[in-house]
Image: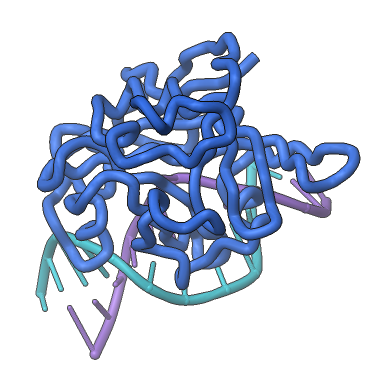
Chain colours: A blue, B purple, C cyan
Amino acid sequence: MSRSSRCGEQLSRDFFQHDTLAVAENLLGKILVFHAHHAVITETEAYIGQNDPACHAARGKTPRTAVMFGEAGYSYIYLIYGMYFCLNIVTEAEGFPAAVLIRGARLLSSSPPVLLNGPGKLCRALGLSREHNNQDLTISPHFCIENAPEKPSFQRTPRIGISKGQDKLWRFLAN
DNA sequence: ACCCCGATCGTA
DNA sequence: ACGATCGGGGTT
């Protein structure tokens, strides 16, 4: 984390190549950049490997989940309930399927800032959809995560909207 | 080929 | 509490 640790710098791959819980926690307060949009991440969830029953990759690699088995720092965007998209960022070592779901952010490129509470609303507001799946977030300044001065205080809770894996406190919510 | 259900959201 | 809406994944 040498170059990437400067404020406003695009995070490099090594930020994402770590334990998913650490990445989910450390993404709080960071800036999600998509073209003209800048948003402070306020809520994340971790989905970790084939032993996590709520993880899409729990039953192995399929065409949809293949990106989760790939290199860290790539986007995993999928359609949910036929109407909404959810944005994840792939984590950990290549071959280990895990990702962080971006559930909430405060949109700065608007006045006053708009609270995007919910992964579907977030993708709709930013214009993220299927065509932005499987993109490397460590390359382009138009789709990346930027470092930020401070990590906010936060709480951990069970993940939202799942029927399995509710015992884990894998949701991170900035105060 | 078919069926079930989901990492959601807005409205009732 | 519920409906909208459709692709993925398991089953036949």
Quarter of the figure with the C terminus of chain A: top right
Say which residue appears at 56% left-offset and 21% top-offset.
A173
Q: Which is nearer the eye, A86 or A58?
A: A86
Which residue is at the front of the view, A146 or A131?
A: A146
Percent across and percent down for residue A92 are 21, 36
Question: Who's the residue at 27% across and 64% down the image?
Answer: A64
Residue with the most extreme front position: A3
Left/right of residue A32 with respect to residue A25 in the rendered view: right
Residue reaching furthest to the right: A112
Judge whether A164 appears above or below A144 on screen: above
Q: Position of residue A157 (x, y in %)?
A: 47, 17
> Picture quarter containing residue C11?
bottom left
Q: Where residue A74 appears, x then y in whole percent?
A: 34, 52
For image coordinates 44% across by 25% down, the residue present is A5
**Residue positioned 53% across, 11% down in the render:** A155
As displayed, is residue B1 above or below residue A18?
below
Say if A86 sits above or below A128 in the image: above
- Nearer the observer, A148 or B11: A148
Q: Residue A128 at what x, y percent from top left?
A: 56, 61
Picture layout, residue A108 above or below residue A75: above
Q: Is residue A104 left or right of residue C9?
A: right
